[in-house]
Image (spheres, rainbow, N blue to C red):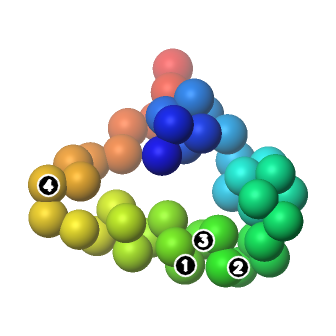
Amino acid sequence: MLAVANGWTNTKIAERLILAKSTMKTHLSRVLAEPGAGPVRPRA
């Protein structure tokens, strides 16, 4: 989640963790769907 908070793209995170981009998107969407995850705001 720190990578997301720092503004990393799904592609960059997937490459760093050696995952497929689609796998990263799935994991991230599931985490953000958890209660209390809060809204995601675009960086200015």
User: Of helix, strand and loop, which one carries label 3?
Assistant: helix
Kindly identify the residue that appears in the image at 84 percent across and 65 percent down: 18
Query: 10 Å neighbourhood of mark 2: few (<14), some, or many (≥20)?
Result: few
| Circle nearer the N terminus (4, 2) | 2
Can residue 11 be seen?
A: no
Q: CB atoms at circles 4 and 2 under 8 Å apart?
A: no
Give the residue pinned by disc 3: 25
Kindly identify the residue that appears in the image at 14 percent across and 54 percent down: 36
Q: Which of 2 and 26 is in front in this view?
A: 2
Q: What residue type is labelled 1?
A: Thr
Q: Splitting the image into 4 quarters, where does residue 6 fall?
A: top right
Inter-mark Cα distance, 4 to 3: 19 Å
Q: Which amino acid does label 3 sit on?
A: Lys
| Circle nearer the N terminus (4, 1) | 1
Query: 10 Å neighbourhood of mark 4: few (<14), some, or many (≥20)?
Result: few
Q: On residue 26, which mark appears?
A: 1
User: Of helix, strand and loop, which one carries label 1?
Assistant: helix
Inter-mark Cα distance, 3 to 1: 4 Å
Q: CB atoms at circles 3 and 1 under 8 Å apart?
A: yes
Query: 10 Å neighbourhood of mark 1: few (<14), some, or many (≥20)?
Result: few
| Circle nearer the N terminus (4, 3) | 3
Percent x, y of residue 42: 47, 36
Q: CB atoms at circles 2 and 3 under 8 Å apart?
A: yes
Q: On residue 16, which mark appears?
A: none
Give the residue pinned by disc 4: 36
Q: Which amino acid does label 4 sit on?
A: Gly
Inter-mark Cα distance, 4 to 1: 18 Å
Percent x, y of residue 37: 24, 54
Inter-mark Cα distance, 2 to 3: 5 Å
Inter-mark Cα distance, 4 to 2: 24 Å
Give the residue pinned by disc 2: 22
